[in-house]
Image: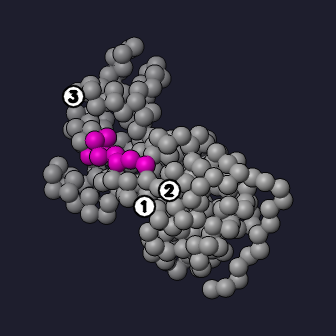
């Protein structure tokens, strides 16, 4: 389907919720999500990212963990791209209810998006497990080799969810509730077949739109699908501000 139809949906709807995948972060220079980056980490550190970014490795080898966390995550976080700015405009216009993502690099928050649910935590919410004080990424970068709490001296836990840890049920519930409220669900930079895409089961609204670099079989379920450069598509679909006006109705395009 055409980008023009996506533009019609986004500029003519309210109560939009975005499931934000990894593609915009990669386009913004975030190396950690690149498919080939796992090999680079394993070559450099002699261990896979799955092993390093696990709760057991953090507990048993905290210095090695924080070395990798600083060098491969915090220093190579990238920045926002056109998708993040388009979402910001949608939120400012009163159309976007919120963003749900597995990403932990805060790119949407960096441009000013306010309602962002990060299911796997974020790099600016590193927390002391003893007293609960929160530290941003800069504090972790500046305090080597081990970042400890200024208040109580405890080792700070990274803000991201590590393998072997249980995700925050409150965040998952918030995400499900937000999706259930949506009239339009925008799956951006990932597919319906992905782990994030599985949250579509909570959607009861009118329009399901998917924007991704490639099309996968499951994406045929969408009312609107656009394949290509995700940032360019979003820049064209929501190029400026489109404040909510009067009654807004959109007819479904049944063309395949």
What secondary structure is the magenta-colored segment mainly?
A: loop
Distance from disc 1 to disc 2, alpha carbons, whole Å, reads 10 Å
Q: Quadrant of residue 74?
A: top left
Q: Nearer the viewer, residue 147 or 106?
A: 106
Residue shown at 23% from the left, 27% from the top: 144
Distance from disc 3 to disc 1, alpha carbons, whole Å, reads 32 Å
Residue interval drawn in magenta: 72-80
Residue shown at 22% from the left, 60% from the top: 39
Name the mark nearer the viewer: 1 or 2: 2
Q: Secondary structure at mark 2?
A: helix
Q: Which residue is mark 3?
A: 145
Q: Are marks 2 and 3 in contact (CB under 8 Å)?
A: no
Instruction: Find residue 8 and report its horizontal and vertical position in percent.
Output: 68, 68
Name the mark nearer the viewer: 3 or 1: 1
Instruction: Find residue 76 and report its horizontal and vertical position in percent.
Output: 29, 46
Q: Which residue is mark 1?
A: 23
The N terminus lies in quadrant: bottom right
The disc placed on residue 83 is 2
As for residue 78 lying within the magenta part, the answer is: yes
Q: Residues within 10 Å of mark 3 (few under 14, many from 20)?
A: some
Residue shown at 25% from the left, 55% from the top: 48
Q: Are marks 1 and 2 in contact (CB under 8 Å)?
A: yes
């Amino acid at each position: 389907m055409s980008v023009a139809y996506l533009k019609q949906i986004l500029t003519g709807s309210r109560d939009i919720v975005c499931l934000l995948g990894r593609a915009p972060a990669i386009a913004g220079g975030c190396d950690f999500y690149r498919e080939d980056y796992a090999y680079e980490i394993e070559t450099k550190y002699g261990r896979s990212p799955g092993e390093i970014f696990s709760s057991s490795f953090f507990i048993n080898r905290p210095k090695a963990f924080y070395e990798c966390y600083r060098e491969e995550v915090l220093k190579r976080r990238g920045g926002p791209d056109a998708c993040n700015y388009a979402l910001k405009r949608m939120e400012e216009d009163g159309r976007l209810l919120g963003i749900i993502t597995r990403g932990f690099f805060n790119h949407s928050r960096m441009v000013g998006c306010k309602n962002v649910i990060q299911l796997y935590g974020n790099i600016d919410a590193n927390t002391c497990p003893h007293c609960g004080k929160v530290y941003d990424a800069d504090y972790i970068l500046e305090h080597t080799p081990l970042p400890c709490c200024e208040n109580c001296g405890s080792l700070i836990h990274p803000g991201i969810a590590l393998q072997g840890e249980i995700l925050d049920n409150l965040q998952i519930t918030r995400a499900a509730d937000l999706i259930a409220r949506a009239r339009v669900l925008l799956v951006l930079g990932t597919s319906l077949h992905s782990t994030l895409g599985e949250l579509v089961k909570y959607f009861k609204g009118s329009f399901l739109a998917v924007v991704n670099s490639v099309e996968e079989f499951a994406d045929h379920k969408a009312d609107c699908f656009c394949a290509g450069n995700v940032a360019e598509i979003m820049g064209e679909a929501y190029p400026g501000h489109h404040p909510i006006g009067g009654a807004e109705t959109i007819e479904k395009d049944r063309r395949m």
